[in-house]
Image: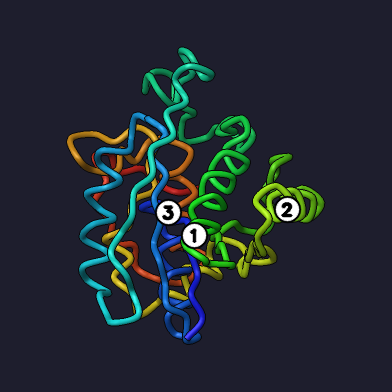
C-alpha cells in the first residue's frame, strides 16, 4: 500500500481528499500545520471529530507540525481575527501570502525524514493565488527534491474541480463535521464571512443539503 501525507485542515476539500486517498488504496498520514491562524482552535476540534468519524486501518493518527507566522504576518487579519473578509468579499481578499510555500515546505521535510514520497493537497480549480499554479508546484517539487535529496511528489487531484464537485464527491461523508470559517462564533461557522459564503454556495450548487450550523443565517443570492 502506497503511503501519502495529506495536508489537512478542517475544511471540506481536504476532508474529501483524505477519504479519496483511502478509497484509492493509500495509507494516509494526515498532517496539520499549525501556523497560528485565529480560527485554528475551532478548526482542530472539527478536524478531530471528522477523523474519528472516518477512522479505519488505512488512516494513521493526525500529526501536527508547528510553523508560527506571527513574526512575518504581524497584525494580519488571519492572526488577529479582526477585519476578516466578509460574506460578499472577493476570493482575492482571503489571500494568505506564501501559505502553500510554507505548508508544503514543512510537509516535505517531514516526508523526507519519514521516507514518504507523496504530498497530497485539496487545492481546487480556479484558485486565483500565485502559489497555486501548475508552474509554481512544478518548480517547488523540483526544488524540494533537490534540496532534500529525496523524491518528493506533490499531488493535487482536485486542481481542475470546483467546490460543488468536491462536495458531491464526498456526498457519503460526514461533511457537517468539517469547518470552513475564518471568523468562528462560539465554536460555530459565523455565516457571515467569505469562506462561509463559499461553503454555502458549494452545497447549493452540488444539490445537497447543507447540514452546517451557522451563527448567522443568510440568504444566498
Which residue matches tag 2?
A: 137
- Residue 202's label in the rendered image is 1
User: Crowdedness of circle 3 by 10 Å Cα count: few (<14), some, many (20+)?
Assistant: many
Q: Nearer the viewer, residue 164 or 51?
A: 51
Cα distance in 3D space between marks 1 and 2 = 26 Å
- Residue 200's label in the rendered image is 3
Residue 125, image quadrant: bottom right
- Residue 166, relative to residue 219: is it above or below? below
> Are circles 3 and 1 on residues that touch, CB within 8 Å?
yes
Q: Nearer the viewer, residue 110 or 96?
A: 110
Which residue does the image show at 40% across and 66% down from the upper left?
Answer: 29
**Element under disc 2:** helix
Q: Disc count in the image?
A: 3
- Residue 47, relative to residue 196: is it above or below? below
| Residue 19: percent from left, percent from top | 41, 75
**Element under disc 3:** helix
| Residue 121: percent from left, percent from top | 55, 59
Mark 3 or mark 2: whose residue is earlier in sequence? 2
**Element under disc 1:** helix
Cα distance in 3D space between marks 3 and 2 = 29 Å
Which residue does the image show at 50% across and 70% down from the upper left?
Answer: 4
> Are circles 3 and 2 on residues that touch, CB within 8 Å?
no
Residue 175, image quadrant: bottom left
Q: Left of 197 or right of it: where is 140?
A: right
Q: Nearer the viewer, mark 3 or mark 2?
A: 2
Q: Nearer the viewer, mark 1 or mark 2?
A: 2
Amino acid at each position: 500500500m502506497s503511503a501519502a501525507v495529506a495536508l489537512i485542515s478542517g475544511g471540506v476539500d481536504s476532508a474529501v481528499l483524505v477519504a479519496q486517498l483511502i478509497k484509492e488504496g493509500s495509507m494516509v498520514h494526515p498532517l496539520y500545520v499549525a501556523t497560528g491562524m485565529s480560527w485554528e482552535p475551532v478548526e482542530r476540534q472539527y478536524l478531530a471529530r471528522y477523523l474519528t468519524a472516518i477512522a479505519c486501518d488505512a488512516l494513521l493518527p493526525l500529526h501536527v507540525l508547528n510553523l508560527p507566522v506571527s513574526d512575518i504576518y504581524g497584525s494580519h487579519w488571519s492572526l488577529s481575527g479582526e477585519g476578516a473578509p466578509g460574506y460578499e468579499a472577493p476570493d482575492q481578499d482571503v489571500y494568505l501570502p506564501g501559505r502553500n510555500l510554507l505548508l508544503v515546505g514543512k510537509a516535505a521535510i517531514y516526508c523526507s525524514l519519514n521516507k514518504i514520497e507523496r504530498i497530497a493537497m485539496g487545492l481546487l480549480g480556479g484558485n486565483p493565488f500565485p502559489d497555486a499554479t501548475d508552474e509554481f508546484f512544478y518548480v517547488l517539487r523540483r526544488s524540494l527534491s533537490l534540496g532534500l535529496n529525496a523524491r518528493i511528489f506533490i499531488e493535487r487531484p482536485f486542481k481542475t474541480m470546483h467546490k460543488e464537485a468536491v462536495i458531491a464527491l464526498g456526498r457519503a461523508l460526514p461533511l457537517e463535521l468539517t469547518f470552513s470559517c475564518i471568523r468562528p462564533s462560539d465554536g460555530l461557522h459565523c455565516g457571515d464571512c467569505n469562506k462561509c459564503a463559499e461553503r454555502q454556495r458549494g452545497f447549493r450548487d452540488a444539490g445537497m443539503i447543507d447540514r452546517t450550523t451557522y451563527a448567522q443565517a443568510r440568504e444566498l443570492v
